[in-house]
Amino acid sequence: MSLKLQIQLFLFLFGLLVQAPVVANNKNNPVSKHQDPIFEMSLEDLMNVEVVSVSKRKEKLTQVASAAFVISGEDIRRSGATSIPEALRMAPGVQVARIGTDKWSVSIRGFNGRFSNKLLVLMDGRSVYTPLSSGVIWSQQDTFIEDIDRIEVIRGPAATLWGVNAVNGVINIISKNAAKTQGTLLTAGGGSFEQAFVGARYGGMINELTPFRIYAKGFIRDHTTTLSGNSANDTWHSARAGFRIDHSQGIDELILQGDIFVNGISDTVQQPPIFQSNSGLNVIDRNETGGNIRLRWDRTFSERSALMFQAYYDHVRHQLAPQAKYVESFDTDIQQRFPLGRRHDITWGLNYRLYNSNLDNTLITAFVPDKKSNYFVSGFLRDEFDWIPEKLKLSVGVRLGYNNLSGIEVQPNARIIWTPDEQSSLWASVSRAVRTPARGEHDVIINRGILPPQPDLTGLPLPIMQAIIGSNNFSSEKLIAYELGYRRQIQTNAAIDIAGFFNDYSDLRDFELGMIMSAVGMHRDVFFSLLQQEHLMLPILFNNNASAISYGTELSVDWRPHERWRLQKSYSYLNIDTKSNPAFRDIDASTGGAGTANPRHQLSLRSNYDLTERLQFNLWLRYVDKLAFYNISDYVTMDAKMSWKPVRNIEFFLVGQNLFSEHHRESQSDFIDTVPARIPRGIYTGARLDF
């Protein structure tokens, strides 16, 4: 569809919605402003939204000593976002860049890349970290988006409570209780880039104490384009289904939840030169299948005393290049909170996590051994002390853990918050966090190409394979973080939240050149049968010789100039200075290139306006600074959504995404060299029926 035709279609449908007749209210068609959260909640209510990801218990947002931001389900609906990464663009301090149709780089406070490894992402408290890269594969992380209650974004270390890899932040996607999703919801639509999507959810009652829901969804997304304007061959077909059961009786609550998914994805990969031939593009079709199941039990003895147990199992097949036979994880977690005297709240917990992986090796990437198990065991203790009741609160804690990749890890934290009145709070913290090694950093071999024989250099008439090789000596990356924040409700219709940070990183991932060696032993076992040719190996080795300093500030402003109009602004500034081996900065954007592979400035402005009680018009303007590392220019773009409810339970919507340009670049894949892609403008329309 041409640019001109897309714009004409958007304006035509927009005009139809604006001119649509208003259906009068009556008993059979009750449409009230009180059904819309923008009218239900005052700004004061929004500032007092409860979050659980900061201290693993419910706290008012205004009373947490952390840089926390909440993206509500209503925010997601109004934005028109169709995926979790797209919704995360709303939060200050979060870097989100789309690499291709199914690929994103997502991080907090920098060090972004396709396999960002300093961010912990949770789905209802279930970690979705992959042990191969210490990151998140976003194509596998999805749900029925209408079932998301909120996304809690914690910027800064949260390792004391959540464990390893909660270095730069935590993202917790929290779904609605099944009691809030009763009845049937159907949604469907399609357009240019979001070619087709359909979803259905049904909620009912097993008995009066046990609500449940089931859902199924699927979509087809079009390909992006290469820099030359050709197809990037990265279309994406996906299907997913799941369920949730909530049971509440007395002081006990029980949750049983699970999902399964199937992805069909294509990629265009830049192949390294093999057998002394020229490199070329290769289209790879890959399938991803997986599922998870989670059980959680809560017993609440009092407002200050509770016990929690959680266990989950996650299994994924065909995950990366190389194709994974399977990657699975098993996790158990127990936590207790109780009072100690009038002013102390004690929380302790134990966690055990096991990862198993079984991989197929290819000419490009191999793991030695191909099968391996990694485990993490840890415990934490935290004391929250009311120094001056309702005015000054101090919390200190420490997590002590052991894993079979880096050994013993200690992660302490101290936070203090002062609330001089109900409208404002000032907080500060200092934390230590670690990012443990991934399997890839210990066991991987990545073929970066075959060089012709160099007899003058090697003395042998054999080709030389350049290879990145993992090392068992690679240890954890460390961070000491200092944070300061301030929140204030300026008036009844305005609020501001500002946070600043200074991060000192050490033992970061870097590379060094090894000695040319004969490809024998384990390396010959991996590649010789595939290459069918003897060769030498030029190793590029992992080490922990890099370091970095980062600092920045994040600002969010929430303002309601009118009861029907809400404006939300966020701004982020980030500066990263790294010290690493300059010869290998092009390999790893998330460390050596971090200073220029992350936007220094980001700006977001959202406008949600209710034209009538049935007609909503939402705009979302974004600015992202340049990424010199990838030679990507800064860009400004806008999304728009118009939604119309002719009756209470039917909604029609029209969405335009990336409206300011036909295409733009946002990021590029590192390590796995997929072809650089441009993200297209998109327009889609659809309907939602809820009864």
Image (cartoon, rainbow, N blue to C red):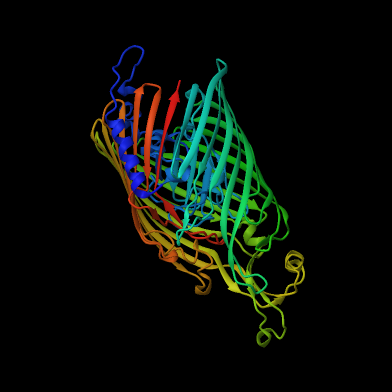
Percent of width and height locating residue 533: 75, 72
Percent of width and height locating residue 528: 75, 68
Residue at the extreme top of the image, as rendered: 27
Q: Is residue 301 left or right of residue 36?
A: right
Q: Is residue 430 above or below residue 191?
A: below
Q: Is residue 387 left or right of residue 129?
A: left
State the residue at coordinates (67%, 78%): 516
- Residue 388 visible in this rendered orientation of the protein: no
Of residues 268 and 358, the one nearer the viewer is: 268
Q: Quadrant of residue 472?
A: bottom right
Of residues 417 and 205, the one nearer the viewer is: 205
Q: Quadrant of residue 22?
A: top left
Percent of width and height locating residue 297: 59, 29
Residue at the extreme bottom of the image, as rendered: 456
Q: How many marks?
A: 0
Q: Is residue 28 above or below residue 115?
A: above
Q: Quadrant of residue 515?
A: bottom right
State the residue at coordinates (67%, 76%): 464
Quadrant (top left, top right, bottom left, bottom right) of the C terminus: top left
